[in-house]
Image (cartoon, helix red, strand yellow):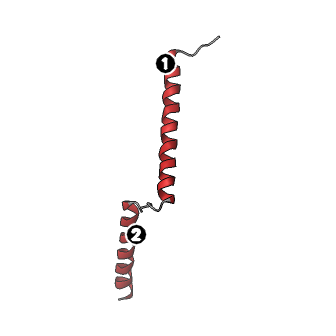
Amino acid sequence: MNTSSPSDRERGTEKLNWIERRREKIRAEIERNRRGEYTVPTWVLAVALIAIVGGWLALIFLVG
């Protein structure tokens, strides 16, 4: 006896499609990284800049 309705099957299919799309995106990203097309996200660069500037300011004000 099958108790799943068509809407349950559609949701299951949508979930499988979403998983497959996600896996494909991950595969594509790994391939790009292996080819050397890796880039650092902007937020990482911003955090690094803030940390460097904050460190210099702390050094200037705490030592000086």
The residue under label 2 is: 48
The residue under label 1 is: 7
Residue 61 appears in which quarter of the rendering? bottom left
Q: How crowded is mark 1: few (under 14 residues within 10 Å), some or many (20 or more)?
A: few
Q: Residue at x 52, y 42 (%)?
A: 23
Where residue 33 sits in the image (x, y, percent)?
A: 48, 58
**Left or right, residue 38 beside residue 60:** right
Q: Which residue is drawn at 51% across and 16% down?
A: 6
**Residues marked 2 and 1 touching at CB (< 8 Å):** no
- Quadrant assignment for the C terminus: bottom left
Q: Which residue is drawn at 47% across and 62% down?
A: 36
- Quadrant assignment for the N terminus: top right
Q: Residues within 10 Å of mark 2 (few under 14, many from 20)?
A: few
Where residue 44 sits in the image (x, y, percent)?
A: 41, 63
Three-letter residue code for mark 1? Ser
Three-letter residue code for mark 2? Ala
Q: Residue at x 36, y 61 (%)?
A: 42
Q: Is residue 9 above or below residue 26?
A: above
**Left or right, residue 42 beside residue 33:** left
